[in-house]
Image: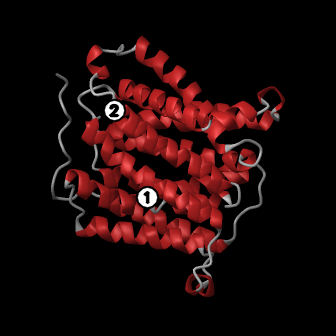
């Protein structure tokens, strides 16, 4: 299997894992402070990824060079997760997932600014289709809501989190100096955990950890191990092999995965309007993944 094919497979798994965090996150968002749960998930994920790094590649000294890189990446992704949980306090999971599908458009723009990655006409068409599909879901196909810009506060809050996520993708490629994905992920998670602990210490201390409902612990373990640790590695692995816009293209699958997650968790099925919007996002994914001639992805950096 080629390096690009492996990158695509990693992002397919990523999209399914991330979708679960929307459904589970909405169940626990109002039962624990976003800063507290995000600090905890980063801490747990750091232990998981750190152990994986020690058992595989080890932690080379070269990875400790320029530690400010981890602070930048950890801060950006911590902002994304905190804003996600604030958004899920009021935004329905499918709507939040639809907002997430706007990330590739922003990632393409950030990729051009930071890496000069070119968005070809086909990619631009795909990004447009995906954005239309996302907006179709967010506004529930209600033209009056579009004219009035009638969207919920939760969606708006989460949108700014997605801006942070879009910046994170090209920043990984720009700041990586040849470290294996698992090592780079460990540094990012550790830095994010440190920053969140300092920032959210009052919320962490005020949380009654011993009396949290079981669903909170289930959600915390899932988002820590699968939606944080695993997805961090998958995104960083793929970002070093694919252009930023194509990496984030897999977010177009998330609303469809969320619909399946909602059904499996016994939630009410969405209406046909939402299925149409999800269909547009899948079409956008197909267009984005077609091979194109254009500027190749920036080559992988070599370790010193």
Q: Quadrant of the N terminus?
A: top left
Q: Position of residue 232 (x, y in %)?
A: 45, 36
Labelled pair 1, 2 in contact (Cβ < 8 Å): no
Q: Position of residue 236 (x, y in %)?
A: 37, 37
The front one of 258 and 211 is: 211
Residue 304 sits in quarter: top left
User: Which callout, 1 or 2, points at the residue further toward the start of the chain?
Assistant: 2
Instruction: State the image quarter where residue 157 is shown.
Output: bottom right
Horizontal arrangement in the rendering, residue 293 relative to residue 91 (left or right): left
Q: Is residue 241 above or below residue 247?
A: above
| Picture layout, residue 200 above or below residue 149 | above
Q: Is residue 182 visible?
A: yes
Q: Which residue is mark 1?
A: 103
Q: CA distance from mark 1 to mark 2?
A: 25 Å
Give how far across and how far down residue 248 sits, in percent: 39, 52
Label 1 residue SS: helix
Report if residue 2 is visible in the image: no
The residue at 47%/64% (across/down) is 281
The residue wearing badge 2 is 68
Image height of 102 relative to 301, above or below: below
Residue in front for this viewpoint, 271 or 101: 101
Instruction: Judge from the rendering whether residue 27 lies leftward or rightward of residue 114; answer left or right.
Output: right
Q: Position of residue 274 (x, y in %)?
A: 62, 69
Say if 203 sits above or below 285 in the image.
Answer: above
Q: Residue at x 47, y 43 (%)?
A: 77
* Residue 110 in which image quadrant: bottom left
Q: Residue at x 24, y 63 (%)?
A: 119
In the rendered structure, the answer to whether residue 205 lies left or right of residue 42 reads right
Residue for point 24% across, 28% down: 178
Q: Residues within 10 Å of mark 2 (few under 14, many from 20)?
A: few
């Amino acid at each position: 299997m080629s390096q690009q094919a492996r990158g695509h497979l990693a992002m397919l798994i990523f999209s399914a894992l991330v979708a679960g965090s929307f459904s589970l996150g909405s169940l626990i968002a109002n039962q624990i402070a976003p800063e507290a749960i995000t600090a905890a998930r980063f801490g747990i994920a750091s232990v998981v990824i750190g152990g994986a790094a020690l058992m595989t590649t080890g932690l080379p000294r070269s990875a400790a060079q320029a530690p400010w890189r981890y602070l930048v990446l950890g801060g950006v992704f911590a902002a994304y997760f905190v804003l996600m949980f604030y958004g899920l306090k009021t935004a329905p999971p499918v709507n939040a997932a639809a907002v997430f599908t706007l990330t590739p458009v922003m990632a393409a723009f950030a990729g051009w600014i930071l890496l000069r990655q070119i968005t070809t006409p086909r990619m631009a068409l795909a990004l447009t289709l995906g954005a239309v599909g996302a907006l179709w879901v967010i506004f529930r196909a209600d033209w009056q809501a579009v004219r009035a810009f009638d969207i919920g506060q939760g969606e708006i809050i989460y949108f700014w989190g997605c801006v942070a996520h879009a910046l994170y993708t090209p920043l990984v490629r720009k700041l990586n100096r040849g470290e294996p994905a698992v090592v780079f992920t460990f540094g990012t998670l550790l830095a994010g955990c440190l920053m969140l602990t300092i920032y959210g210490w009052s919320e962490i201390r005020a949380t009654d950890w011993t009396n949290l409902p079981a669903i909170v612990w289930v959600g915390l373990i899932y988002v820590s191990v699968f939606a944080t640790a695993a997805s961090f590695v998958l995104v960083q692995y793929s970002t070093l092999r694919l252009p930023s816009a194509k990496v984030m293209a897999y977010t177009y699958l998330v609303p469809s995965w969320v619909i399946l997650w909602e059904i499996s968790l016994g939630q009410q099925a969405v209406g046909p309007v939402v299925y149409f919007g999800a269909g547009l996002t899948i079409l956008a994914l197909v267009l984005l993944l077609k091979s194109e001639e254009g500027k190749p992805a920036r080559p992988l950096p070599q370790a010193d």
